[in-house]
Amino acid sequence: MPDIDIVLVEPLYEGNVGFAARVMKNFGFASLVLTDPCELGDDAYARASHAGDVLENAEVTTLDEVFRRSHLTVATTGEVSKSVCTPMRMPYYTPAELRGMIADIDGRVSIIFGRENRGLENAEVRRCDLICTIPASPDYPILNLSHAVGIVCYELAHLPRGSYQLASREDMECLYRHIDHFLDLIGHQNFKRENTMILLRRLVSRTNLTSREVSTLHGLMRRTAWRIKK
Amino acid sequence: MPDIDIVLVEPLYEGNVGFAARVMKNFGFASLVLTDPCELGDDAYARASHAGDVLENAEVTTLDEVFRRSHLTVATTGEVSKSVCTPMRMPYYTPAELRGMIADIDGRVSIIFGRENRGLENAEVRRCDLICTIPASPDYPILNLSHAVGIVCYELAHLPRGSYQLASREDMECLYRHIDHFLDLIGHQNFKRENTMILLRRLVSRTNLTSREVSTLHGLMRRTAWRIKK
């Protein structure tokens, strides 16, 4: 992934800048760039919460400087052209598409967000290399600035869930054999057995059991068998 | 998709409730449910902005009622168990995985978000059917409530980008023929031609040209040819 700068153009409300810093840090981004920002006081730091460092280290500079040093600039916009004949804001990409497009770039990518009240001006959009738009409801497509930053950061980070170990193939076959014996024990009829086992295999398979869950199921069947035999 | 309720358990700050209402509406969700909420005053409505209707129609009820009427309940949590041996918050799914899991449900699904300061209690998580966790940076994994609501709504809505018409196959072949003629015109050498045409085809193909862009390129080559011949 490239180095990513989140650039807020002339943000008007310090609360939004604070929230933007927080959600950036939530997804592992640290480089916040501001052009001609509002004053950042207590409210900004309160909303940044444990991301005060991102706010503290925010760089205040000009949009000219951003364009000068970036390998790629991305304008985020809520308004999209209705026609391919207006190249200003077209074609546009979703944050997920953008992730794919910049994934292999070795360089500096600036994602540029406009003012809360009127977004980016045409003259600013014109200078950007790509347009990114978050698909939203036509009933109310305008996101709060910090929520837009959050969704773009979420998509670009695309953090792994982290993995948990599922039960092994062997564990699962052992579980199915145990279930089969258990059906014997409760007198489940043989002529139905194959279909019932298929049904149970389908049911169990779609739950993606962990090894802990498998051993709990073994335990419950053993305990039940013990009560039956007693 | 099922009917989706966004449930906020005992929210403490009206600003967060207002922002949650706004970002819900941004992604087409309208059903906001609150249990024992803080008072909702000017600040909530200011942050809801054009989603005052979502706030106005929010239902205040109990978590018991939510569990009673939901076909499926999903606990959202920032803390995940470290081991498969603690089934309380394990296994957990990302918002994107959750979308796939509930896509075909015909019924009511409640997505439950905890308090700003201490999330959901174990006793509440225990009653839920599924656990959903937004993958976040280990440095600061706790999202603001409204940002968490926003990312879950964004993923569940999964709104289409909307499409724009790319240039047709025919348009593209016509463009490549024009480029080939143009190379003749500027005296590009024949022995290099095949490789150069392949390079240009690769380059042009990955830009996914619109029909407008194709006709602008034709126009530029025609104009250049006219200047050369003059």
Image (spheres, coloured by chain):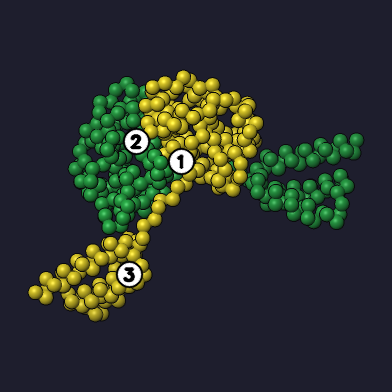
Chain colours: A green, B yellow
The amino acid marked with disc number 2 is: Leu
User: In which quarter of the view is residue B26 placed?
Assistant: top left
Q: How far across and how far down the image is residue A124, in percent?
A: 22, 45
Left or right: A86 as drawn, with respect to A99: left
Q: Residue at image x 90%, y 38%?
A: A229
Rendered-image quadrant of the C terminus of chain B? bottom left
Residue that lies at the very extreme toward the bottom in this rendered image: B190
Visible residue check, residue A3: no
How far apart in space, not on screen, are marks 3 and 2 (Cα)? 39 Å
Q: Name the residue under label 3.
A: B172
Which of pointers 2 and 1 indicates the residue nearer the eye? 1
Residue to which mark 1 is pinned: B28
- Element under label 1? loop
Labels 1 and 3 within one chain:
yes
Q: Is mark 2 on a helix, strand or loop?
A: helix
Residue identified by numbered label 2:
A145
